[in-house]
Amino acid sequence: MERTLIILKPDCVNRGLLGEVLMRIERKGLKVVGMKMVKPSKSVWDEHYAHLKDKPFFPRLVEFMSSSPVVFAVIEGKDAVRVLRDLCGKTNARDAAPGTIRGDLAMSTQSNIIHASDSLETAQKEVARFFKKEELFEYARVTEDLLYAKDERA
């Protein structure tokens, strides 16, 4: 099973949408294996978004992400990276399809509710950046037999 990182952004926290977003993720069949609320420093966001440092919106993005606590969660499931990105919808929430998290709950590119790792390689780096091994849990849910065929669980 793949693991990926999500960040429930300041707009999600401040609009009271944490439960709604987590419910959609869990209802899809993905599993939360680690979660915490923190308010990272600007230097953490500088590192996390270093690949965007030359973009004109970078200072605004770091300021936004530093404006309130966020929720980090590690999500697990078959093809979790792709499935979660599809569930989120397009980055520009105005272009995101109805039924997606962003399509239903947001109107912005910056304030778009959720960050989700864009590849398995990125997910592994991001999970390691924000979680210690002892903060991640292995457990079986009683619904797993209903979510996957036996040969899909590997």
Image (cartoon, rainbow, N blue to C red):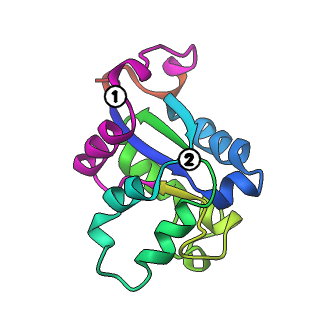
Determine the secondary structure under disc 2.
Answer: loop
Residue 110, above or below 121: below
Return the residue nearer the eye: 105 or 62: 62
| Segment tinted magenta in the rendering | 116-145
Q: Residues within 10 Å of mark 2 (few under 14, many from 20)?
A: some
Q: How many marks?
A: 2
Which residue is situated farthest in the bottom direction here?
56
Q: Which residue is mark 2?
A: 39
Which numbered marker is on residue 119? none
Q: Quadrant of the N terminus?
A: top left
| In-image side of 67 versus 44 (left or right) | right
Residue drawn where x is 26% and y is 47% of the image: 120
Which amino acid, by three-letter code, is at mark 2?
A: Lys
Residue 94, above or below 152: below
Which residue is situated farthest in the left direction here?
121
**Res. 91 in view:** no
| In-image side of 21 versus 57 (left or right) | right
Q: Is residue 23 magenta?
A: no
Which numbered marker is on residue 152? 1
| In-image side of 54 versus 75 (left or right) | left
Residue 33, above or below 94: above
- Camera-side mark, 1 or 2: 2
